[in-house]
Image: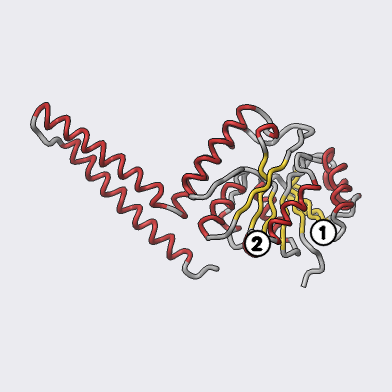
Amino acid sequence: MSNVDFTIVIPAKNEAINLQSLLPELISLYPQAEIIVVNDGSTDNTEEVCKTNNVNVISHVYSKGNGASIKTGARAAQGDIIVFMDGDGQHQPKDISLLLAQLKSGADMCVGARDSKSQASVGRSLANSLYNKLATLISGHPVADLTSGFRAVYRKKFKSFIYLLPNGFSYPTTITMAFFRAGFSVRYVPIVALARKGKSHVNIVKDGMRFLIIIFKIGTLYSPLKIFIPAAMAFFFTGVGYYMYTFLTRHVFTNMSAVLFLSAVIVFLIGLVSEQITVLMYKDTE
């Protein structure tokens, strides 16, 4: 049995300047918490700052990525609840209590949802808005902040999906969609994220595309028909439209119409098979 109330996991790469103020505040507010900093191949004195503040630090011998750090921290956590927060000083320690309160009231995971003023730029705000809308459409649940790394979750439930998590920055996307598919409850609480000190490790273009890919990957993995049925309908109605055009103008049924109709059937059948595979994947899980 663990004697800690909960575990705080902080992935950090060259965040010594931010950890110097963050760690003392966490220790002061939550003396009952286990604090784990995953040092992801930092080249500054991140590890020394952690040791000075007497918190657990696990160091990667080279940088593996934000998601890899999250997985390392989750495997080492002793608390029944894990709070994930960034090491860049954007997440405010006082907001942890808001996340924990939602878990105590019945949520399986609670996410700190940033407002538009908390976004680093207009471009990032628009991108996150797009991700949220796409995730809402695919999952059928309202998603207030798909990419937020500030969240509290029950350790055992989180670890049951740990094999799905990518090593990059898109772990929040994957775990959120996985929880929805598994029927776990996800709640959001509004937070204000502060401006970070130092340079961001997120590449807007590269990681933005990765977020979109992960959304569709998880959509096809957990709700395949929500992806395949619209695609099949698009082929079918395009075929109907093209057939009507050729029939009215030339009174013929063309090979293109046949290809479009056949494509609709094939895509729909692939969706059905994917749905059955998904059911088989979950039949022996919690």
Q: Is residue 190 above or below residue 153?
A: above
Position of the C terminus, as image quadrant, is bottom right
Q: Please provide percent x and percent y for residue 34.
A: 81, 59
Q: Which residue is mark 1?
A: 33
Q: Which residue is mark 2?
A: 106
Q: Is residue 125 above or below residue 261?
A: above
Position of the N terminus, as image quadrant, is bottom right
The quadrant where residue 148 appears: top right
Q: Give the alpha-carbon distance from disc 2 to disc 1, as whole Å.
A: 21 Å
Q: Earlier in the sequence, mark 2 or mark 1?
A: 1
Task: Choose between 44 and 79: the one closer to the eye.
Answer: 79
The quadrant where residue 72 appears: bottom right
User: Residue at 31% across / 45% down in the picture?
Assistant: 232
Q: Please provide percent x and percent y for residue 138.
A: 47, 47
> Given the current orientation, which residue lies at the most extreme bottom position?
1
Element marked by disc 2? loop
Q: Please provide percent x and percent y for residue 128.
A: 59, 36
> Given the current orientation, which residue lies at the most extreme right position?
52
State left or right for residue 66 relative to residue 137.
Answer: right
User: Residue at 66% across / 55% down in the picture?
Assistant: 71
